[in-house]
Each structure stands twice: as structure tokens, then as C-alpha cells.
Image: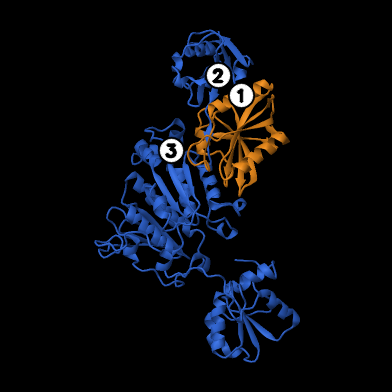
């Protein structure tokens, strides 16, 4: 007779006993006797095919029977047979399992609207399941991409982001919710995507993509989707895609207009064929500076998602060699032909860029310097003190009227930067002027104009945002 | 519902914080009642994963067998398994799910910057396709 120890949660299936005495000459016979005596245990230990479930290990005394003679391991009187689950885990997803060439019952139900279309079908859904897509950025474009690619059943989705959800994101980044403010965008996006589709593996890359890490991260994926909002990263993603031979599904947005295309795909052009040189820094405003219609990234991101899915399935005409332009106000799509540039420094016939470079420098963006005290700058608290003391000075607000409408400092006079040169005669040369804007950039330019014209002028450091932080928190930030 | 008694909880949090930035794992011993499970003893076990332990753990079945024996000798039950997620939320990851077992409660402790952040308890199904959250008090 051998004693089988029953794990606590299984005792309900074994007449509440913590151990059962059974006869049998091998472990296999003992287990058969066990499940004959307690048939309910069978389903706990064996799968539908009659095999021991993957997490079930059987020990004879202190040894795993897999390293003895498995089911045929002989059992002596007084031996103890134990059922021990194997348990592991971890915060990151497991390494890819060998591509399973079939869909589970749950997957068939979930993807049925795909499966009944011959263009997708089971074969296409399996391609989606085996696909590995990297989303660079989980912001405006990354939000619809993440939601729909997860829903569509793309098997593995990588996310690159290092940002935290903030209230100003919620107007367009629909993958994040109000309760996510303050969380890492990666965590917030991954949770939402898993909620939509728990079958999708999500790999989080909490980094700023750089020349040092880009190849290592992109290498594991089949398709890279660019949802970034700045030129250095855009060139970096492009060059890395060309060097690794991965398609780069590109999208960009500004105010009411967007663009999309597929770069670096099967002999097609790359981003550098279209834009060999970055624009001078500061010429093209970012969304934070220029604003963006909240819905716009939805439209462009979904065009990118559509192209991604088409590339995976190998159906339709990919958006290669064509730049799609979208104008939301006119509600019009246009298309520009793009050609591969044989002189392109990265994808041309004689490439000169053969490894990743310093993209900040390439885009002319100076390395961040420690905050310099600019002579004549004045802190918002000091401005407040001047107002309270009744000092003789003029505070001018050089923002635009629609910004002034959002918030303003009570005693400030609105003179938008663009009108300042024509309106200098409204100002008194004998009185000190303090200029402010949103964050201090435009007002610095205003101070330059004023000084040149012979005024005594100072710039309020940090603009109305700093005023809100340091002086009056009731002033809204935007 | 799973209730973790103060001494066991302190032990689990201390273990998870000490293991940071790696994941820790251990067994929870207690009693299984009709409507409630309680944990009286936390038994730290070795994370036997041979790769980067910052994002993975593995329990040796031998250690689990030892934990089960320990429980039996104290007239307690092996109620569940705990492990930590350094710098990420206490969700039940795909890896957790694919290496789980439906018989136990799985408590995940989120440790951020070396300090306890939050915890959840999970009940995976036998097919390893999903895990339900279980009410947890400590």
C-alpha cells in the first residue's frame, strides 16, 4: 500500500481526506486507483486528452517521477506519492511559445467576424496571432493603435514609452482614463489592452528610444509603428527600420491635418527620401505648442492600424510610395506619390548612414543645459510683490487673445507678440515693463524687441504656468 | 475571500522589499474555511529562476512539497503562493497565468522603488486562460 497525499484544495474531491491509502505496483497504477476511487479528482489532475495537466508533478517520496521511470516507477509498501504543482511567473510576459497552428475555442468565438471573411479567415487570424508589432509611443497615435491592434488579435504588441498620464492627454489619448492620471502610460495602456483582449502578449519597454537601445528593441518585432511626436525619434525609428529591414508604419498629426504612409517596405521609400533634412528646431510646433484636434490622432492612428493589419495579412494595396494627406476641416484626403531617392543617405544606392547616429544633434537640438539665470529675468513671486506694493510698472501679456481667454493675470495688458512691433507707441519708455506669456519663450522674444527699442523690460520666468504654480493656483494651466 | 494575518503580511512585505529589485516568492500557510481562507504563516522560498530574476520567478516543486509538509505538521493548509512584481502593478501576467495552478490563491505584491505599493490576490482557472481577482484583506 502507498499513501497519496492530497493537496488541501483537492480534498473536497477526495472525501475530505488529506491522504488516501491505495494499492498498486507502479505510480501509474496508484494514480489510476486514486481516480477510480475518487472520479472527481480526475478532472483536476488530467486534461480532456487524459494527460496529466501541465502544472501537475508527481513525486514518489522526495523524487520527481519524471526523473525516475515516470508512470512505470515501482511503488513499495509505505511509499508516499505527492501531487505537487509546478509554479512560476513573473511581471513580464513569457518568451514566445512555439507558434500554435490552431485557434482555441475561445479565440474562434472572439475573432468570428474575422474568420468568416475569406480575406482573413483562420489562416489570416493565425498570422495576426503570430505577428509582433512595436508601437513607439502610447500617446495620441499609440492610443487607437493599441486598442484596435489588441482587439484584432495581434499576438504580441510591444509598447515604448516612459511618460506618465497627465490631464492634458485625455482629450485625445483614449487608451488612458481619468483614473489613470499619474500612472505610467505603459501600465495604463497595457491594462486597457489586456482588458480588451487577454490573449495578447504585451511587452513594455520603459525607455526613451535612443541610438543605443533602438536596434535591440526593434529587432524582435516584424513591424514598427511610429507614433512619436518629435523629429529626432522619427529619424531614429526610420533609420533603425531601414537598417533592420522592418517596415515603418508612419503617421503624424498637427492641428487639423495628418499624414500617413508605410516607409522602408520592400524597396519603397523611407522617411529620409521624403525629408532628407529635419526642419530647423522650433519651426514646426509640437502638439503641445500648436494644439491638435483631439479626434485627429484617432483618424491617423487607425489608418496606421489598418496598414499594419494589411501588412500582416498580406492583403490589399499597402500605402507604400504614397503619402496620404488628411485635412479634417475640408474633410478631404489627398495622395502624394513618393519615390525612393537613389541618393538617400540611409536607403539609397550608396548609403552613408550605416549605423545609428546622434539624432538630437542631427536635428540641431542643443543638449539640455543646466537652467541658466538670464539677467533681468524676474520670478512670478517677485512680480506679485511688485503688484502688491503698487510699484510703477506695466505687465504685458504677449500671448494670443484665445489664450488670454483661457486664463490671465488681472493687471496684465494683452499685446500679442506679433503685434508688439507696431504697438510700441502704446507703451511708456520711462516705465519698467514686465512681459509674460505661457511658459516664458515668447515673452523672452518680446523683451528682446522692447530692449532694442529702448525700453526697460524684464521677462517673467516660466510664464503664466509658473504664476499658477507659485502665486495663484486658481489660474488654470493649459 | 482571503485574509492575511498581520504577522504573515509583515513577513511577506519584508521579503518582497528585501528581494527588490528582484522578484521574490513564497508559500502561504493557513486555514481554508467555507467562505474564507486565512493565512497565518508566510514561508519565504527561494526564487529558483536561473535568468534575470527582476521579472521572473520559479518555485522548486521540492520547496513546495516541503511547504506542504510544513503545513501538515502544523495542522495548517497550504493556502496559496505569493510573489512580487518590482516596479510594476500587481496584475496577473501572462507568464503568471501560463505557469499557474488553479488550486491556490496567488497573491501578487507590487513593490515600487523598493517600497510596498499594493497587492492583489488571483484565482487562475484550470485551463490557464484567465484569472479572477479574489477579495484580499490584510
Q: Which residue is mark 3?
A: A111
Which label lies toward us, 3 or 2? 2
Residues at marks 1 and 2 touching, judged by CB atoms closer than 8 Å: yes
Q: Which residue is mark 2?
A: A82
Display colour for chain A = blue
* On screen, residue A395 above or below A156: below
Display colour for chain B = orange
* Figure quadrant of residue B45: top right
Local SS, label 3:
loop
Q: Which chain's residue wears label 1?
A: B
Picture coordinates of residue A430, whole percent (x, y): 65, 92
Picture coordinates of residue A185, whole percent (x, y): 54, 52
Alpha-carbon span between mark 3 and mark 2: 41 Å
Residue at the spot 41% in from the left edge and 64% down from the top edge = A359
Residue at the spot 66% in from the left edge and 84% down from the top edge = A394
Q: Which residue is mark 1?
A: B68
Picture coordinates of residue A207, whole percent (x, y): 49, 54
Disc 2 crowd rating (10 Å Cα; few below 14, some 14-19, many 20+) is many
Residue at the spot 50% in from the left edge and 28% down from the top edge = B127
Amino acid at each position: 500500500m502507498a499513501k497519496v497525499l492530497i493537496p488541501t484544495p483537492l480534498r473536497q474531491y477526495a472525501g475530505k481526506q488529506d491522504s488516501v491509502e491505495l494499492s498498486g505496483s507502479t505510480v501509474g497504477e496508484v494514480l489510476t486507483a486514486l481516480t477510480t476511487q475518487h472520479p472527481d479528482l480526475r478532472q483536476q489532475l488530467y486534461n480532456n486528452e487524459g494527460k496529466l495537466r501541465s502544472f501537475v508533478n508527481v513525486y514518489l517520496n522526495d523524487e520527481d517521477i519524471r526523473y525516475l521511470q515516470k508512470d512505470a516507477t515501482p511503488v513499495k509498501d509505505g511509499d508516499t506519492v505527492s501531487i505537487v504543482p509546478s509554479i512560476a511567473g513573473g511581471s513580464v510576459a513569457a518568451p514566445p511559445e512555439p507558434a500554435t497552428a490552431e485557434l482555441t475555442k475561445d479565440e474562434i468565438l472572439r475573432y468570428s467576424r474575422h474568420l468568416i471573411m475569406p480575406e482573413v479567415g483562420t489562416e489570416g487570424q493565425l498570422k495576426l496571432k503570430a505577428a509582433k508589432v512595436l508601437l513607439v509611443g502610447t500617446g495620441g497615435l499609440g492610443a487607437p493603435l493599441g486598442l484596435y491592434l489588441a482587439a484584432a488579435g495581434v499576438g504580441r504588441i510591444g509598447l515604448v514609452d516612459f511618460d506618465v498620464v497627465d490631464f492634458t492627454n485625455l482629450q485625445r489619448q483614449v487608451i488612458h482614463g481619468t483614473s489613470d492620471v499619474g500612472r505610467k502610460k505603459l501600465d495604463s495602456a497595457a491594462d486597457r489592452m489586456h482588458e480588451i483582449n487577454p490573449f495578447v502578449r504585451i511587452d513594455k519597454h520603459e525607455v526613451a528610444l535612443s541610438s543605443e537601445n533602438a536596434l535591440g528593441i526593434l529587432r524582435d518585432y516584424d513591424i514598427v509603428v511610429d507614433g512619436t511626436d518629435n523629429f529626432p525619434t522619427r529619424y531614429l525609428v526610420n533609420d533603425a527600420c531601414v537598417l533592420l529591414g522592418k517596415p515603418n508604419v508612419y503617421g503624424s498629426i498637427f492641428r487639423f491635418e495628418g499624414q500617413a504612409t508605410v516607409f522602408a517596405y520592400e524597396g519603397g521609400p523611407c522617411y529620409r527620401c521624403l525629408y532628407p533634412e529635419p526642419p530647423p528646431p522650433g519651426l514646426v510646433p509640437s502638439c503641445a505648442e500648436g494644439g491638435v484636434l483631439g479626434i485627429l490622432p484617432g483618424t491617423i492612428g487607425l489608418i496606421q492600424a489598418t496598414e499594419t493589419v494589411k501588412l500582416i495579412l498580406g492583403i490589399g494595396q499597402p500605402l507604400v510610395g504614397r503619402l496620404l494627406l488628411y485635412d479634417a476641416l475640408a474633410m478631404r484626403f489627398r495622395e502624394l506619390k513618393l519615390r525612393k531617392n537613389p541618393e538617400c543617405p540611409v536607403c539609397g544606392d550608396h548609403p552613408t548612414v550605416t549605423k545609428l547616429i546622434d539624432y538630437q544633434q542631427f536635428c540641431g537640438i542643443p543638449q539640455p543645459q543646466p537652467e541658466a539665470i538670464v539677467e533681468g529675468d524676474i520670478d512670478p513671486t517677485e512680480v506679485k510683490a511688485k503688484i502688491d506694493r503698487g510699484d510703477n510698472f506695466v505687465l504685458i501679456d504677449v500671448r494670443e487673445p484665445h489664450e488670454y481667454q483661457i486664463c490671465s493675470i488681472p493687471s496684465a495688458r494683452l499685446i500679442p507678440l506679433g503685434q508688439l512691433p507696431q504697438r510700441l507707441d502704446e507703451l511708456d519708455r520711462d516705465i519698467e515693463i514686465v512681459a509674460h506669456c505661457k511658459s516664458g519663450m515668447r515673452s523672452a522674444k518680446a523683451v528682446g524687441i522692447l530692449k532694442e527699442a529702448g525700453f526697460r523690460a524684464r521677462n517673467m520666468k516660466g510664464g503664466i504656468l509658473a504664476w499658477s504654480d507659485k502665486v495663484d493656483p486658481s489660474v488654470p494651466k493649459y | 475571500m482571503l485574509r492575511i494575518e498581520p504577522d504573515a503580511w509583515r513577513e511577506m512585505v519584508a521579503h518582497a522589499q528585501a528581494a527588490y529589485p528582484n522578484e521574490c516568492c513564497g508559500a502561504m500557510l493557513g486555514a481554508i474555511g467555507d467562505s474564507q481562507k486565512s493565512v497565518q504563516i508566510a514561508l519565504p522560498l527561494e526564487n529558483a529562476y536561473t535568468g534575470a530574476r527582476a521579472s521572473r520567478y520559479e518555485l522548486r516543486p521540492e520547496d513546495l512539497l516541503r511547504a506542504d509538509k510544513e503545513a501538515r505538521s502544523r495542522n495548517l493548509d497550504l493556502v496559496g503562493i505569493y510573489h512580487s512584481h518590482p516596479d510594476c502593478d500587481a496584475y496577473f501576467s501572462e507568464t503568471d497565468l501560463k505557469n499557474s495552478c488553479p488550486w491556490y490563491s496567488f497573491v501578487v505584491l507590487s513593490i515600487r522603488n523598493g517600497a510596498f505599493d499594493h497587492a492583489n490576490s488571483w484565482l487562475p482557472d484550470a485551463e490557464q486562460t484567465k484569472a479572477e481577482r479574489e477579495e484580499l484583506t490584510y
